[in-house]
Amino acid sequence: MLCDFDGTATPCIVIDMLYRKFAAPSCLQMVKLWEQGKISTPEEMRACFATVTASQAEMEHFLSTIPLDPALADLLDFCKQRGYHFAIVSDGLVWYIQHILHCHGIHNVTIYANEIHFGPNGLRLSFPWYSPETPLRGTSKLALVRRYQADGFQVVFIGDGLSDVEVVGATDVLYARASLLDYCRAHHSPVIPFLNLREVLEDLRKRDWSAHSIG
């Protein structure tokens, strides 16, 4: 089971909140260009974080206030009980995803996302899950879906936004809300609408997949 983070596991887009709090106002124009598909995630992140002067500790203090969907922990427990693999796939950053999860007592979750490295000479970004097949994304969710399928898993994907669009038509089961749901409906793609992870969990409980078949 693959789950987006910003706007799916959280009620807000965390990366945008970081930009608004700590980056220069010019960063908002970069976000608009990204939303229009004119620049990639790596380009947006490098441009925006180049204007950030806050320390890692200052940003983490802010991140500690970010809420999670209240049903995320229950969804993780459900997957563990059923023997389903669960991973977060995000075009955000492992750093803040892990920090927020830990603040809510959630540990040992597989995370596929972009990386930020803090050092004495500033910060550096890297994109270990980039694929030229999805050049506008730092993390290729499509490549990760196909990787799990190649290993014999059915892939259940939960998402909400622009960075999730590439998996439409590729994943075995798709739960969507917000702009991703709008996209699916506009393209007549099979989709299960949801408002929150509690609804996803309730729907999953009605299904009968064999253990270890879900990735």
Image (cartoon, helix red, strand yellow):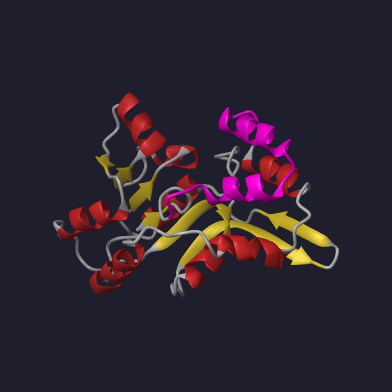
- 2 and 13: which one is in front? 13
- Percent x, y of residue 164: 45, 42
Residue 79: image quadrant is: bottom left
Whether residue 67 is visible: yes
- Percent x, y of residue 110: 47, 67
Residue 123: image quadrant is: bottom right
Residue 40: image quadrant is: top right
- 17 and 124: which one is in front? 17
Q: Residue at x 62, y 65 (%)?
A: 61
Per the rendered image, the range of residues in magenta is: 10-39
Q: Is residue 188 magenta?
A: no
Q: Residue at x 68, y 32 (%)?
A: 29
- 2 and 6: which one is in front? 6
115 displayed left or right of 10: right
Q: Residue at x 78, y 47 (%)?
A: 51
The residue lying furthest to the top in this view is 186
Is residue 215 depicted above or below 166 in this figure?
below
Quadrant including the C terminus: bottom left
Main secondary-structure element of the magenta-colored stretch: helix
- Percent x, y of residue 65: 53, 62
Q: Residue at x 19, y 60 (%)?
A: 209
Is residue 160 depicted above or below 85 in this figure?
above
Is residue 18 depicted above or below 109 in this figure?
above
